[in-house]
Amino acid sequence: MCGVTQTWQVEPSGPLRGDITVRGSKNAVTKHMVAAMLGHGPSVIRNAPEVGDVDITAAMLESVGFHVGRDGSEITITPGDEVRPKVPEAFTGLNRIPILMLGPLLHRAGEAFVPLVGGDPIGRRPVDFHVEALTALGAEIEHGPTGITAKATRLRGARITLPYPSVGATETVLLSAVLADGKTVLRNAATEPEVVELALFLQRMGAKIELSPDRRIIIEGVEKLKGASTRLAGDRLEAFSYLVAGLITGGEVRVHGCPQDRLVTAITTLARMGAQFDITDEWITASAPGGLRSAAVHTDTHPGFMTDWQQPLMVLFTQAEGMSVLHETVFENRLVYVPALQKMGCEIEVFSACLGGPACRFHDGNSAHSAVIRGVSKLQGAEVTLPDVRAGFSAVLAAAVAENPSTLHGVHHIERGYHRPYEQFASLGLRLTRGA
Ligand code: EPU
């Protein structure tokens, strides 16, 4: 499925309309799969999306001795007789998941090797918080040229404060501390819905986890965890992306399967720009019969405007009346996709200063992390190469409102993170064909 076809030809096709059902999120399903490594007995994850990252994570789990069964949207993970503690180097750079496997492998085998992690080219994306947290929990860590080696006969609880509320590092602590000896107190933890969802799954497996106010998570280590079963909640990134697909083309997309509370800031932001919403317990729909106006938005940790929403919003800004400002405060390089949009006629200028919101961690660096966007821009079809998953989706949005067809290379990036995007876009009326 993923990576087989690299190019789409996209023809502007007028307003996109229809119904989309989102599945569980890429950024929850893969973490649940890693959590399942901790259980004695099978775990079942339902409502899983068909995304490339699931294929990669399944192959990694199988390479260390777990059986991964797939049946439509259901994934069953069963521990094998023996856990092999080395994730093969063939998985180098494919996604961010190997670093999360360190804790579970240490619990199962007392040692671990994981290859260097990848993920989208959106900033330095270091793993220092993960490594420092594991070291605090008693692991001996060595960095090698091809990856990270860790050893620990038994992890022990610790007090850990993250320098920034990192999603991945919080997950590393959860996945490691649940079976450690004694209590772990994690301060400045991430509270993204996907993190809470993982904590709830671990609780179902028998973990003792307390979510306290002020970004504190307290974990009382237990001796053993069992397998568990869960149904993932809908992907808020995907839901937002398709709502914007409707708005930007002057159409209306009804998104099913994503709870409203996961989209509260997104809805408020789009409503401020002039979008009108209908919201029920089953679906959310947005339209903008009176057009859209500009806004100033800065990305933030949950419950702020999430960094994965900014790429569709950036394209939407080009179709809203007036000058908009976007300030990315989570990843320093997350505007690297702007040249692809500029090539399609988007009038976007990037700055290293903090614009449109309070100064952020990147205020004295050189990374272009703020943008000023002029709307309404006439977009032109172009031949562009997609740099990452969210930016990839945005290029499709730009192509959908351009004046002539576009050729988009690197479509596997979109397929790594969105459930069947080709079929979903086609069902909304976008004319697209797969190229070589
Ligand atoms: N950071 C460090 N050191 C670390 C870890 C993080 O400096 O050891 C910094 C990062 O460089 C960044 C900030 O902390 O500036 C936040 O990074 P975080 O760890 O929260 O991000 P992540 O866990 O690597 C996940 C999602 C991202 C999503 C972010 C923020 C996965 C696989 N990825 O990344 O999703 O944008 O949280 O919510 O869960 C995507 O789906 O396209 C995507 C990039």
Image (tube, rainbow, N blue to C red):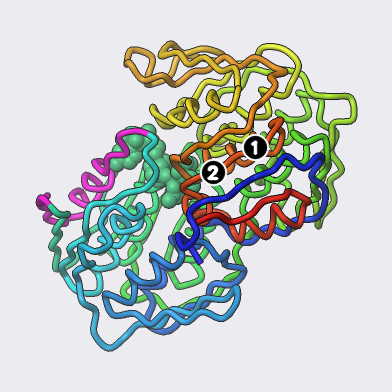
Residue occupying the point 25% across, 56% down: 92
**Does residue 41 sit above or below 151 in this rendering?**
below
* Label 1 CB sits under 8 Å from any ligand 1 atom: no
The answer to whether residue 398 is left or right of residue 43 is right
The answer to whether residue 236 is left or right of residue 102 is right
The answer to whether residue 128 is left or right of residue 100 is left
**Which of the marked residues, 1 or 2, is nearer the chain's N terminus?**
1
Viewer can see residue 349: yes
* Amino acid type assigned to the residue bearing label 2 in the image: Leu
Element type at mark 1: helix
Q: Residue 311: x percent and y percent? A: 56, 34
* Label 2 CB sits under 8 Å from any ligand 1 atom: no
Q: Residues within 10 Å of mark 2 (few under 14, many from 20)?
A: many
The question of residue 124 being in magenta is answered with: yes
* Amino acid type assigned to the residue bearing label 1 in the image: Ala
**Residue stretch rendered in magenta on the structure:** 123-145
Labelled disc at residue 186:
none
Element type at mark 2: strand
Q: Nearer the viewer, residue 16 or 295?
A: 16
Q: Which residue is mark 2?
A: 408
Q: Residue 166: x percent and y percent? A: 39, 41
Circles 1 and 2, Cβ within 8 Å, touching? The answer is: yes
Residue occupying the point 61% across, 39% down: 406
Viewer can see residue 216: no
Residue with the most extreme bottom position: 81
Q: Which residue is mark 1?
A: 399
Whole-number angstrom distance, CA of label 1 to CA of label 2: 9 Å
Q: Quadrant of ligand 1?
A: top left
Q: Quadrant of residue 3?
A: bottom left
